[in-house]
Every structure is written in C-alpha cells, then in structure tokens.
Amino acid sequence: MTVEPIVCLALARSEVTAETARPGALVHLRLGGPDPETPVDPRRSDVDEWGRSEHMRELARRLYEPLYRRWFRVEWEGLDKIPLSGPALIVANHAGAIPSDAPVIMHGIETELHRPVYGLADHMFKAIPLVGTMWSRVGGVAAHPQNAYRLLREQGQLVLVFPEGTKGTGKLYGERYQLRRFGRGGFVEIAMRAGVPIIPIAVVGSEEAMPTVAKIPGIAKAVGAPYAPITANMLLLGPLGLLPFPAKFRLKVLDPVTFDVPPDQERYSKSRVMEEAENIRGRLQEALYGMLRVRRSVWFG
Amino acid sequence: MGRRVLVTGLGSFWGGRVAEALEKDPDIELIVGVDTVDPVVPLERTEFVRADQSYSILNRIVKATQVDTILHTFLVVDSTRANARQLHEQNVIGTMNLLAAAGAPGTSVRQVVVKSSTLVYGSSWKDPTWFREEMSRVGAARSRVELSLVEAESYLRDFAEDNPNVTVTLLRFSNVVGTDIVTPITRALQLPLVPCIFGFDPLFQFVEEDDVVRSIEFVTRSNLAGIYNVAGDGRLPWSEVAAICGKRLVPMPPILTEWAAAPLSRVNVELPQELLDLLRYGRGVDNRRLKSAGFVYRYTSAGAVRNFAGALRLQSTVGSRRPSYKYEQDVEQFFRHSPAIVRDNDGNAP
C-alpha cells in the first residue's frame, strides 16, 4: 500500500494542462509580485507631483472663505470666459505688499468653477521654511517655463501667472494701478508653445488692501528679498499688519487671447512675443482705468 | 556568436547584481568582471579580475578578452563610502581609463553603458519640478560626488562624439531603495526617528533596486543609445516616505543644518551635503524617455518605498537574512576551469 503524499498546494487552472493535471502534481504557485503592467502605487497622502494636496486646498478654501466673502466681498465679471475644462493661462495685475490677488483669483475660480488653479510663483518661496511647503501644498508651483508647459500642454490645467512679478507688488501706493513691465514676455511664449489661450483678469482692490508707503532698500538687500516694504497696515495695526484692509475687490475677466502659431516650436519671433505681451498689458491697463472710473469708494466699490 | 560583456565594479552591489542577472541569459557568451574588491554575490560563470582603483589594467583586459559590451557600474554615488580622493580616482580617472580602453584603435567594443545618478542635476530652490535628460543643472555642482559625476559624464560625452559607431548609453538613476541596498537614505529611514529639515517637506522620487538591474539589462539587450533617467513614477513628500516606513520625523533646524546633522554620524547615519540639499528641495526627473523606449517599471516611487518598508519590518523580526558569501579565488578557479569538473551540455558546472 502506498501513501501518496499530498504536495499539491494549489491548482492554477489556467496553467494546468490535461497531462499535468494529475492529483498530487506539484504546481508552481504564482508569487504575488506586482503585475508589471499595473504597478501598485500605495500612496498615503494626496500630495500630487507638484506638491499640491486637495485636502490642504480644501482646508485653505474653508479658512479663506470668510475673507473672500465678507472681508473683500469679491465680485466677478465675465467669469464665464474661463473654460470649464481644458488648459488656459490666466494673467492678472499684481499688487499689495503681500498680494491678495493670487488667493482671491484661485479661491474664486475653484469655488465657482470647481476646477483647480495652479499659481506660478517666484522660486525664492521654495527656499523659505514653512512658507515654501505651505505654498506648494495649496497649489503654488515654481515659475519655471518647463513647469508651466507641463501643466498646460500635458495636463490641461488652469495656470495663473503675474507677469509683473515682484515689480508689481513692490511698487509704492502712489503708483497704484500703473502696470509695470510684463517681464520679457515669457508668459506669451509659454502660451504659444503650449498652444493655449491667455485669459487676462483685471483686479481692483488689491492695491488698497495692503498699500506700501515706503521701502527700506538696505534690509531687502541684506536678507535677499526683492523688497522690504513699510505698509500702511503695519503702521496702523502694528503686529497685526499682515492683515489686509477690507478693500472691495472687483475682478473683470477679459476676452481670451489666442495666437495662431503652431505649438511646440523651438523658438518664437521675439518681436511677435513682445508685441502680444504689450498688447495684453495695454488691454489690462485700459480695463483697470475703466473699472476705476466707475469706482465710487475704495471700501464699498 | 553571443555577446561578450565586461562589468566594472563587480564587487559593488550593482556590478554583482547585474552579472548575476546576465548569467541567466544564454545569449551572453562571456562575462568578465573587474573590481578592486572581491565579489560579494556567488557567481557561476563570471570571470573576475582584480584591478587597482583607477583601472589602469583595463586596456589589456579589453584587448585580451575582445569584449563587445562594457557595463560601467563602478561609479560611486554614495559619498559616505569614499573620501574625496577615492571618489576622484574611481569616478573620474576610472571612467577616463575605461573609455580610453574602449576607444582604443581597432577596438572590439560596440556598446558602453554607464550607470550614473540624478545627482548630476543637483537639488536647489531654482530647479524645475521635473528634469528632462537634455536639461542641465541650475547651479554649479557643490559636493564632491556631484563634481566627479559631472566630470565623468563629460568624458562620456566626448567619447560618444569621438566614437559614433559605439552605442553609448548613460543611465541616471534616482534614489534607490530596495530589500538589500544600503544608502544614506535607507540608513536614515531605519532610525527610530527619521531626520527632516524644519519647514521643508520635499518631494522624493525613488527607483526600486530590481528596476535598476532590469533597466541595465534592458538597455544592454536592446542596444539603446542616449541618456535616460531611471526613476519610478510619481513623487511623494518625505513625510509620507517616513509614514510608509512607519517612522516619525524629527526636525533639524533650517539654518546651520550641517552642524545639527553632524552628531548623526555617531549612529552611522551620515547626511552629506547633497542629501541635505535633497531633504530641503527634493528632485524630480522625467522618466518618460526610457518608458517610451519600451521599458516597463515594476514599481512606482511609492511602491518602491512600501517594498523597502516591508523588508525593514521583516529584518527587524528575523534579522538580516542576507546569505554570507566569501569569494575564494582557488575555489572559483577550480569550478570554472578544472578538467575534474563534470559539466553539462552548456558547459556549466553543477
């Protein structure tokens, strides 16, 4: 009498043919390794490849909501010109020592249109502890042309950029609503390369939310900051000077600008780029003047 | 006729693993390994030659063995394992000698594969979120290991220009984790409290060690030329890396971080300059070029970290399970070449 030892652990149906499928046959167990076609991605957080986290964004929106609705009482005009899907580069005027225009635009579009906005900001933010990390978690991305291209061309996102950069936020109250130079037109070149429209937004209210009355060049140089402002908020509120004044915010979305040039070119005509940049700057400046003409009060609009 | 392959750095982690993988391939007729130290993995048919650090003997080896493929896995990317002098000797002078041997007149070499690191991109606050292969680093290299790798790569670029008939493949690997490899990052993740820099939570990208070996095999088999980043999909914050490993973070001050990190060397965790930069700014590389060439990753960045965390947990319970192997010249020679050995049809010893 023979005792057949049972060594069969599992019969993999698909692999066992008629000849081999005898009882007691040793069958290879497939090791539970990851399938090469679909590697598992065991993420714990929802931080995306840009450092943005929808949870943090949600929290930021909840905290910012009272400021947006009750403090600034933001009102939009022409929000329907921003597409509900597909990429676009949003440009706006930039003002206030600590500019409120960026969070207002991002908050507004995300709550009204329910789509994320990635805000391009100076690289220097990344070097500041806490600030850099927080900024990237709530949707900030370093303003590198490659980053903008990837977001627009490959991922079809909304990207917000302020072509004036720190020249806009660093200007004094006396120069309010006077647009600075629009960089070197890099934003136009990116939009051309990515083949996306540019949507200009004119923002009124940001200048008065945190006006700069004086600048201390020595300190700015010493700490490597673009400017070291003395704001009216600091003078009036002292340590609470980070709080913006409750200026009435009005935003006007202008008609999208499209360029009839092929995307993905190595380079674009510099004169064309500068001409388009100047054209957008002119339209924004005109829109700002128009809005200021009908504004009766800084605080009530 | 099968391919004849020379593997540099056979005694290093990668050299051994690559040779082990190639031995299974019947199309590869001959594997010769060179290193300054003995191999640490048991190899069946790889021939081992001991060389000095700068590989001055390489010219003779290449001529004598008529190899057609050189896999250069010898570059040191972990600066805690070598001092400045050794780094320069191995990475710069070693690569120079290797390429001189490969480019000698009448050479038999048809492909050179170099294993470099994404360290060449550096890590700074001015970086783009993703580096593509043709992009160069933002600032000048600061740490010695980065300098030596940049220099080694520049030799390779010259070599590729001078030898258009040789397939030159440069692979840049991001941070490697896996069940076996030990790097400053894996050592840091084994600490009860994982160091981070206060106020920074950079995005990391990882590649699993099996994917490293597979990618070297892949480019060798498919004769792929060019520069390729090798890194898993996706990036994840350092805090999440620690969380997957089940560890808590302990912040170091954002200023004078080098001083704060210095005492960690007491517990065998050195955080060199390039790693401190990484803990501050992170680094992302675009891995799509290799993927579009047909390579399929088995692990994403997060998957690689989870795999590593599993290995850590296993190790903490059952101890290190790595089989100890000691290379003995006489024994290896006996099994490979003695007429006393009864060989099978392929000529392999049992």
Image: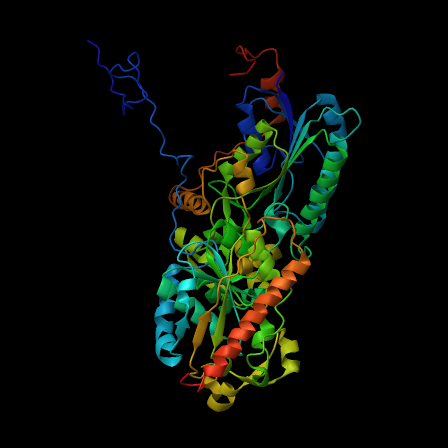
Which image quadrant for residue A55? bottom left
Q: How are the residues colored?
A: rainbow
Q: Nearer the viewer, residue A149 or A237?
A: A149
- Quadrant position of residue A16: top left
Q: Residue furthest right?
A: B105
Image coordinates of residue A49 in percent, x first then y, are 47, 53
B124 to B83, vertically: above or below = below
**Which percent across, then down, holds residue A252?**
45, 71
* Residue A246, picture quadrant: bottom left
Determine whether, in the image, residue A284 is placed left or right of residue A1.
right
Is residue B219 found left or right of B97 in the rendered image?
left
For the N terminus of chain A, the image quarter is: top left
Q: Is residue A12 above or below residue B214?
A: above
Q: Is residue A198 visible?
A: yes
Q: Residue at x 59, y 72 (%)?
A: A166
Q: Is B84 in front, or is B335?
A: B84
| Image location of residue B336, percent across then percent down | 60, 18
Q: Is residue A142 above or below residue A156?
A: below
The extreme left residue here reads: A1
Q: Residue at x 70, y 42 (%)?
A: B90
Nearest to the observer: residue A216 or residue B271: A216
Can you see residue B270? no
Q: Number of callouts in the render?
A: 0
Residue with the most extreme bottom position: A236
Q: Indicate the quadrant containing the C terminus of chain A: top left, top right, bottom left or bottom right.
A: bottom left
Residue B67 pos. (x, y %): 68, 24
Q: Tell me: A71 left or right of A197.
A: left
